[in-house]
Amino acid sequence: MEKSFYKDILKFVASGEKMLSILIDPDKFANTEVETFLGRIPKHTTHLFIGGSTVANGDTEETVRALKQKTDLPLFLFPGDYSQITSFADVLLFLTLLSGRNAEYLIGQQVKSIAKLKNTSLEIIPTGYILIDGGNSSSVSKVTATDPILQTEVETIVNTALAGKYMGSKLIYLEAGSGAKFPINPEIISKVKEAIEIPLIVGGGIKTESQKQAAFQAGADMVVMGTIFESIISPPSK
């Protein structure tokens, strides 16, 4: 039977076991240092996300291939655009930028990706992506020409997540953006989790152990962190 990484996520959620993903930006990653990098990530890391808002053509595939040779952790593509898709990864988060109204990121990029996906071996997981204000102008906001939803607009965030679920998303990803000054408020995470039944991913601005645990306790099933992980060493509590 073919492995399903989405089913594995559902098993984590059903058991109450939390997931931690480390986000790798190929633009900032040294492929020659893969072993050193893997030796530093937390032992409780469950997934690796690979992608960035602006990545040179071919760099994502090179990074994925370098990682694939050295780790059995699931490699999830978190692409900024369709050019970053490579079949050497395990999973593609098929993103829809629900928080924005730019048609290019609601359907345009998705259509452009189909030529690469028609015969792919990638497991494709429809993912509702919601950009939330993290106190800075994120690269996602600049590249997509969309504004994040303010953290004070809790009802709008919850309704956007529900709209994503009703449209067929299998995951909801709340993101404060790269370089966020502060993470998503736990109250927002809690209300979104109460409203949806599908797994919830939270990322952006999570820089301390307490912030990570607060996201988990509020209802995040998976937390995504960047290189700040080096100071986060304790496993997530159930």
Image (cartoon, grey):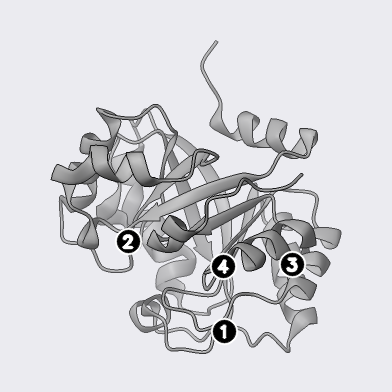
Q: Is residue 169 visible?
A: no
Query: Circle 4 sits on which residue?
Result: 208
Other-residue count near label 2 (Cα within 10 Å), few / some / many at <14 / 14–19 / ≥20: many
Mark closer to the observer (2, 1) = 1
Identity of the residue drawn at 37% across and 45% down: 40
Please, is residue 90 above or below residue 98 in the view? above
Mark closer to the observer (3, 4) = 4
Is mark 1 in CB contact (under 8 Å) with mark 3? no
What's the CA distance linking mark 1 and mark 4? 19 Å
Kind of residue at badge 1: Asp
Query: Circle 1 sits on which residue?
Result: 133
Q: Position of residue 82 (x, y in %)?
A: 31, 55
Labels 4 and 2: the sequence-earlier one: 2
Mark closer to the observer (1, 4) = 4
Q: In which quarter of the view is residue 89 placed?
A: top left
Query: Circle 2 sits on which residue?
Result: 81
* Callout 1: SS: loop
* Callout 3: SS: helix
Mark closer to the observer (4, 2) = 4
Kind of residue at badge 4: Thr
Kind of residue at badge 2: Asp
What's the CA distance linking mark 2 and mark 3? 26 Å
Query: Circle 3 sits on which residue?
Result: 189
Labels 2 and 3: the sequence-earlier one: 2
* Callout 2: SS: loop
Please, is residue 99 above or below residue 27 in the view? below
